Image: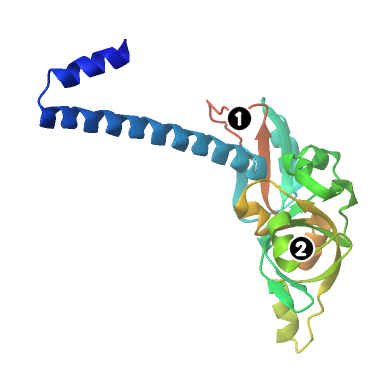
Amino acid sequence: AGVFLVAMIFRSTPFFNAMSILGIMLGVTVLITVQSVMNGFAHEYERVFVETQGNLDVRANEPIKNPQEVVNAIKQVPGVVLAEPVMDGVVMLRFGNLPATPLARSFDMNNPDAARDPLAKTVIEGNFEDLDDNSILVGAGLADRLGLNLGDSVDIYTLSMLDDIKRDEVPMPKELKVAGKIFTGWVGVDDNYVFLSLRLMRQLYRYTDEVHHIEVRLDNDDISHMLDVQA
């Protein structure tokens, strides 16, 4: 019926008017298609963002001291299913003569909740549980770019090692073994991230008990209300 109606319109309409109507119809069709694609892209972006960054992020103007106390307080808020103390920052990684400057993100391997992190389920080679203070998980894209395989050794440097240079000391890198590869399907993560144990990150940054922030995950992705957390 719709096709018949369009045909009748074109038969009874002058050529240029018909072309104008056709142009409008095509424009509307393209707009609907593009909007559908963008909505799908936005949903996928939101899914990956929540998977890699959490629903909420608790930060302060300085490193968070006594993070476990903050984590325990956050877990008392209804709807919170996971709260993780996290450190992250740029590191220099070297494999042979190949350098890279990825972002490093920590997992608290002493906390059983670490295995519940959605990122822990994206390990495609190796095992998440094998991550310790002497190993590293590498984004699959970064691993492919450097030619890394399981069991390979890489050297890690951080900006904190500049303090060694100021004291006329030679900074010694931390040698780590590749324990696994992570694939999220998101280039921003797969090509630019490595993952270390929280304890190792603290050592590299010369921290004691502090962390950079706390990632919070809720029982669903539909955040329709704000959480008022008083620290």
- Callout 2 amino acid: Tyr
Which residue is nearer to you in this view: 30 or 201? 30
Label 2, on which residue?
Answer: 207
Label 1, on which residue?
Answer: 221
The single residue placed furthest to the bottom in the displayed view is 168
Residue at 76%, 63% (x, y): give it: 207
Q: Earlier in the sequence, mark 1 or mark 2?
A: 2
Tag 1's secondary structure? loop
Which residue is nearer to you in this view: 1 or 92? 1
- Callout 1 amino acid: Asp
Residue 95 shown left or right of residue 48 in the figure: right
Residue 95 shown left or right of residue 52 in the figure: right
Task: Tell me if I can see residue 210 in this picture.
Answer: no
Residue at 23%, 29% (x, y): give it: 22
Which residue is nearer to you in this view: 4 or 193? 4
The single residue placed furthest to the top in the displayed view is 1
Colour scheme in use: rainbow
Residue 197 shown left or right of residue 16 in the figure: right
